[in-house]
Image (tube, grey):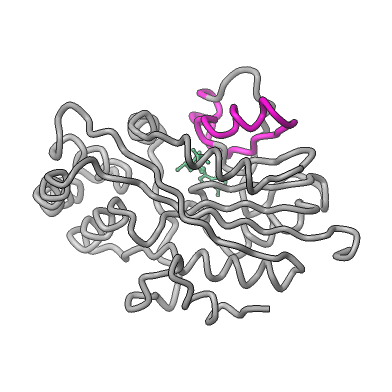
Amino acid sequence: MATEADWRAHPLCGPRDTYPDRYWGPDRLDPETWRRFAALLDPAAEIAAIIAALGDATDVVDVGGGTGTLAETIAARVPLIVIEPDPDQRAHLPAQLTVRAGRAEAVPIADGGADAAIATWVLQYTDDPDLAVAELARIARRRVVIVQPAPNNTLVEVYNREAVAAGMLVSHHGYLLARAAADLEAKGFTVTLEHVAIPLRTPPGGAPELADILSRMHTSDPVRRAAMVAATTDFIAACLVHGPLADDGVVLCARRDYSSSV
Ligand SMILES: C[S@@+](CC[C@H](N)C(=O)[O-])C[C@H]1O[C@@H](n2cnc3c(N)ncnc32)[C@H](O)[C@@H]1O
């Protein structure tokens, strides 16, 4: 069984030189901006990787299901419940989905009440990601799937430039992945990590529009937002010279034989 220190050395838990000694969050999520941003993403490879990670799961709880893009595709294959704390996000979920209000830190599902639990791009919005991972392991009998940004994710680089410009703490998603992997292994799961490519369509307004969208996902304070946009527009423009940006992720797949774990 690998420890958190072992997982830190995994290439998908990088970068190693900026590994923080504590959680920087929670990040802020503005539902309207999130929907604007999500419309630019192509999640096909991510959805395929999550479905593969779920394997033969007989039912799924999707914690922090957001706008329901992933949930809708998975729900077409297997019964699924979305747990979502934000009323605005819940109001935009497809009508056919089963939805409950709730938070990752206290998921309103019984112990072992689901065959599988997923949380995609959610841990950084929780008050306590360790507790959120423990909750996923508590409710899931056989599989837990977590998605977080990959070390090569350009948007994390933008986010961290915004954070520096606004005097906020920088993020590090390998920190969340390494801790989640170690905790899930300690609870009897076998954990694997996989890189997944998620292309991001450039909006019509190019770098300035992207810088504006990303800053709105980081803060509601207009002064901070102006500092963020000033700090990131040229960087985004320089990246776009090489092609569209990508919001690549890491899919953490945790599996266990439930009969031997309880
Ligand atoms: C970036 S979105 C991801 C949505 C979806 N999982 C996806 O991959 O498309 C993050 C979601 O987490 C939700 N969220 C924020 N805080 C949360 C918490 N403490 N527990 C569970 N979900 C939370 C947000 O409301 C939002 O719907």
Is 93 placed above or below 25 here? above
Query: What is the quadrant of the C terminus in the image?
Result: bottom right
Residue 82 among those drawn in magenta = yes
Number of marks present in the image shown: 0
Q: Residue furthest toward the top?
A: 95
Is 113 placed above or below 43 here? below
Give the quadrant of residue 162.
bottom left
Residue found 25% across the figure and 59% down from its top: 163
Q: Position of residue 116 (x, y in %)?
A: 73, 47
Q: Position of residue 64 (x, y in %)?
A: 57, 42
Q: Which residues are magenta?
A: 66-92
Give the quadrant of residue 182.
bottom right
Query: In this rendering, would 230 be left or right of 108?
Result: left
Q: Nearer the viewer, residue 115 or 231?
A: 115
Residue 162 among those drawn in magenta = no
Query: What is the quadrant of the N terminus in the image?
Result: bottom right
Q: Position of residue 257 (x, y in %)?
A: 83, 60
Residue found 43% across the figure and 70% down from its top: 11
Residue found 44% across the figure and 56% down from its top: 26
Residue 81 visible within the image: yes
Residue 223 visible within the image: no
Residue found 45% across the figure and 36% down from its top: 43
Is 199 placed above or below 96 here? below
Is 104 placed above or below 152 here? above
Q: Nearer the viewer, residue 156 or 49?
A: 49
